[in-house]
Image (spheres, rainbow, N blue to C red):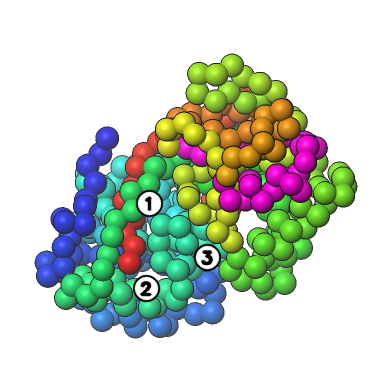
Amino acid sequence: MIETISLDDIKPGRKPHIGVLINPYSGGNKNGLAAIRRTIAQYPRTSHCEVRKPRDVLAALIDFAGREVELVVVNGGDGTVQAVLTALFHHHPFETLPVLAVLQSGTTSMTARDVGFSGSPVKALEKIFKWADSGGGDPSIVPRPVLQVQAPGHDTRYGMFFGTAGIYQGIQYFHRKVNSKGLKGELGPGITIARFLWAVSLGRSGFISRVPITIAVDDHPAQQLDCLVLLISTLERLFLGLHPYWGTEKGPLHFTALRTRPRHLLRALPFILRGRKSHYTTPKNGYFSHNANEIKLNLDSGFTLDGQLYTPENRQEHTVVKLGARANFLRF
């Protein structure tokens, strides 16, 4: 595994070289970036680059590596973070991996809320620069596993949250019906999941369609499920603070799936959302949760990786989600 810079390597007083990636298309950046640019200008050992597509991210990281950047700040949404992780671990522009700092600049920003900075990106940058310049603040490093996703017909990608079945359909609904209303932060996804749960509780199949998926978790035999929801993540906190995992194994990937028409859904739901085992959340009732190293899926559905949507070329080949790397995230 590639060596990663630690907090001790970039301790304050040495004035580490910082690289800032700015995605002007991210939801939180659409109202202008003048304040971000003014803040960056106050710290002389900063390189910054605007990025719009994954190829821009890779080009910027190659440039940062040549400048010996030790801390990469991501001013973008979950999709931008995914592009950064993919560039780092698939293309390897750095000999020694930089520490990452993720700002809350996207529409949902699940990754930033879990391993990065909540609140104003400007204030987050000010904290980072103050610490780098003079040692102010109390930083910590959050080490976190990173998913590797290999799907038929697609390049290998790296990210933090994979979802399919109802999650994929819910994101499509969010983009069609909710995001256009201008709702920001966690409110939009919250409305979407409320709409989803309401439809399921009433047995309305028009909103969420069943998705047959063949699932193999680590070395266990594959099983076929008609899935309502399937997610795999290394994030400990999803939007609205949800933690829907209750597996007991030591694997780095959290896997949770709900069968179509699970039994006792309304009674099981409080336990699911808080990640607590109960006598309701059992495989017999249609609820599955494990900590794993690798999950192989044969999908009759598209999937999302950090908010970006993809469709496997076929279901005969596996879509494989496994531990792909580990990253260090800076947080105050």
Tag 3 residue: 106
Quarter the N terminus occupies:
top left
* Residue found at x 29% / y 71%: 128
Quarter the C terminus occupies:
bottom left
Quadrant of res 116: bottom left
Proximity of marks 2 and 1: CB atoms separated by less than 8 Å: no
Tag 2 residue: 124
**Considering only order in the chain, which callout, 3 or 1, is on the residue closer to the N terminus?**
1
Magenta residues, start to end: 253-275
The local crowd at label 3, few if under 14, some if 14 to 19, many if 20 or more residues have their Cα within 10 Å, is many
Q: Residue lying furthest front in this view?
A: 279
The tag on residue 58 is: 1
Indicate the position of residue 192 as horizontal and vertical percent values: 72, 59
**Considering only order in the chain, which callout, 3 or 2, is on the residue closer to the N terminus?**
3
State the CA–CA distance, disc 1 to disc 3: 19 Å
For marks 2 and 1, give the one nearer the viewer: 2
Query: Is residue 111 placed above or below 134 in the rendered structure?
Result: above
The tag on residue 308 is: none
Left or right placement of residue 66 versus residue 284 in this view: left
Quadrant of res 230: top right
State the CA–CA distance, disc 2 to disc 1: 24 Å
Does the segment drawn in magenta span residue 162?
A: no
Q: Amino acid at mark 1?
A: Leu
* Residue found at x 53% / y 46%: 161
Q: Amino acid at mark 2?
A: Ala
